Amino acid sequence: MTRPLFMKEADLPMPMPVPVDHDLTERAVRVIDRSGWGTSTAYPQIRTVTLTWVCPACQGPRGLPKEHLFHEDGHWLTCDH
């Protein structure tokens, strides 16, 4: 059996897709704020914070956040997970 000299394009491995905005150094994400627990303020609240999007251990990019819908205290809330 002989091996082909050239590989067809269909035989080549597909490159991994690069997520959009994966090279950002900062990213705004939504987090749950439960600091108002036990007070008269609304509980919980969703806050937007800006985080450094570089891993402190390897200096590589962090994973991409995913939207997380959850039910708490009779309300549906959305944060990033």
Image (cartoon, rainbow, N blue to C red):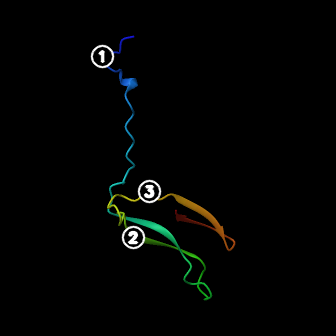
Dot 3 corresponds to which residue? 64
- Residue occupying image coordinates x 36% and y 11%: 2
Quick one: which residue is furthest to the right in this view? 74
The disc at residue 50 is 2
Amino acid, disc 1: Leu
When asked about the image quadrant of residue 44, the answer is bottom right
Left or right, residue 30 beside residue 42: left
Quick one: which residue is furthest to the top in this view? 1
Q: Which of 15/31 is in front?
A: 15
Determine whether 77 is above or below 24 in the image: below
- Does dot 1 land on a helix, a strand or a loop? loop
When asked about the image quadrant of residue 70, the answer is bottom right
Quick one: which residue is furthest to the front in this view? 1
- Does dot 2 land on a helix, a strand or a loop? strand
Sequence-first disc among 3 and 2: 2
Disc 1 to disc 2, C-alpha distance: 52 Å
Q: How packed is label 2: few (under 14 Cα within 10 Å), some, or many (20 or more)?
A: few
Disc 1 to disc 3, C-alpha distance: 41 Å
> Would you say the residues marked 3 and 2 are in contact, meaning their CB atoms lie under 8 Å apart?
no
Dot 1 corresponds to which residue? 5
Amino acid, disc 3: Leu
Sequence-first disc among 1 and 2: 1
Q: Position of residue 10 (x, y in %)?
A: 40, 24
